[in-house]
């Protein structure tokens, strides 16, 4: 008998990653659900049991900013399952702030988690994906296509991921590996909650940027009031996982498609600037 296909997903303790792990397992995949802190696995494991897929989900530790952790996890997967058919890069962290007031270490940290973590994990997985003629699916963001106020570091990292994957895709295709990016908009998940933002303190420290930041926060809170659920955002990821030939770029909602279309069709950049300037005034 042919062994089930195996997918490794990063950042599965909550949100889109958790929902993607459940979706992959329901689709019959052996699902390696990874997270930096496996002590946070109980929510996923309970959901897996509730959905009747606990036997298809295996939790492993993987810290995307630690090459040793990535290598150890992949070695275990190959030793235990003999194959890796897909990688879903989902782990990430938001960063809110404007560059004049940010510590450069915070900018570097955003790049480490959101960009270099993706690069390192993809690089390590590619030999196994080549052998399986598999695929790489990376959760980016609409913020990887359209730069957003007070998200300079986060959007820079996500833009870098988009450029990296768009450049990798034709090369990977020559060795049988499909590459896809999935671009969610606002998602109601712990990704934002985990920021732990103290809004009054942020505004008090914002100095000349306080009016713009206040307008941005009000707009963003409204956007997240009508956000997709993690399961809705994960559904296109599972479609890309199971499709014969997934598209390179996929948005998770009609809103996200309309949003990124603003910049993809904006040759001189004016439409993006006209849009985002309304967020800060």
Image: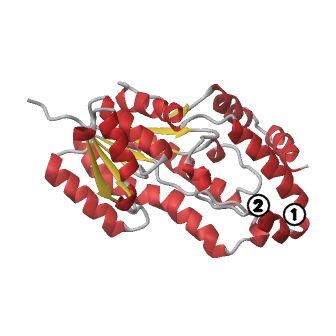
Q: Are marks 1 and 2 in contact (CB under 8 Å)?
A: no
Q: Is residue 264 above or below residue 127?
A: above
Question: Does 97 sit above or below residue 260?
Answer: below
In the rendered view of the protein, which quadrant contains the N terminus? top left
**Which label belongs to residue 199?**
2
Secondary-structure class at tag 2: helix
Query: Which of the colour schemes (rainbow, by chain, secondary structure, one colour) is used?
Result: secondary structure
10 Å crowding of disc 1: few (<14), some (14-19), many (20+): some
Q: Position of residue 111 (x, y in %)?
A: 56, 63
- Write down the quadrant of residue 5 in the picture: top left
Q: x%, y% of residue 155?
A: 65, 53
The residue sitting at 39% across, 68% down in the picture is 66
**Among numbered discs 1 and 2, the one appearing first in the sequence:** 2
Nearer-the-camera pick, 214 or 174: 214
Q: Neighbour class for label 2 at 10 Å: few (<14), some, many (≥20)?
A: few
Of circles 1 and 2, which is in front? 2
Residue at image coords 40%, 48%: 43
Let me know if residue 176 appears in the view: no
- Tell me residue 227's x, y (percent): 64, 36
* Residue 108 visible to the viewer: yes
Marking on residue 26:
none
Instruction: Give the residue drawn at x 43%, y 52%.
Output: 11
> Rounded to the nearest whole Å, what is the CA distance between mark 1 and mark 2?
13 Å
Residue drawn at (53%, 34%), measured in percent from left and top?
A: 233
Tally of numbered tags: 2
Where 159 sits versus 105, above or below? Answer: above
**Residue that label 1 marks:** 209
């Amino acid at each position: 008998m042919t062994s089930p296909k195996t997918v490794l997903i990063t950042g599965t303790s909550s949100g889109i990653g958790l929902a993607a792990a459940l979706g992959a397992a329901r689709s019959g995949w052996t699902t390696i659900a990874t997270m930096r802190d496996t002590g946070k696995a109980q929510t996923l494991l309970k959901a897996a049991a509730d959905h009747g897929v606990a036997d298809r989900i295996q939790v492993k530790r993987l810290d995307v900013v630690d090459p040793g952790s990535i290598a150890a996890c992949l070695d275990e997967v190959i030793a235990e399952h003999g194959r890796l058919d897909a990688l879903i890069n989902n782990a990430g962290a938001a960063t809110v702030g404007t560059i004049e007031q940010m510590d450069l270490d915070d900018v570097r940290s955003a790049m480490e988690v959101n960009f270099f973590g993706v690069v390192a994990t993809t690089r390590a997985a590619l030999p196994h994906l080549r052998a399986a003629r598999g695929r790489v699916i990376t959760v980016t963001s609409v913020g990887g296509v359209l730069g957003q106020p007070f998200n300079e570091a986060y959007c820079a990292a996500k833009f870098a991921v988009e450029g990296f994957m768009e450049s990798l895709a034709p090369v990977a295709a020559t060795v049988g590996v499909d590459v896809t990016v999935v671009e969610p908009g606002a998602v109601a998940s712990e990704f934002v909650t985990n920021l732990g933002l103290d809004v009054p303190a942020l505004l008090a420290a914002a100095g000349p940027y306080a009016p713009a930041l206040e307008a941005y926060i009000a707009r963003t809170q409204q956007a997240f009031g009508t956000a997709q659920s993690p399961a809705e955002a994960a559904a296109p990821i599972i479609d890309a996982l199971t499709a014969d030939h997934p598209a390179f770029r996929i948005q998770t909602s009609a809103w996200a498609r309309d949003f990124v279309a603003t910049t993809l069709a904006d040759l001189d950049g004016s439409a993006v600037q006209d849009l985002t300037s309304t967020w800060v005034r």
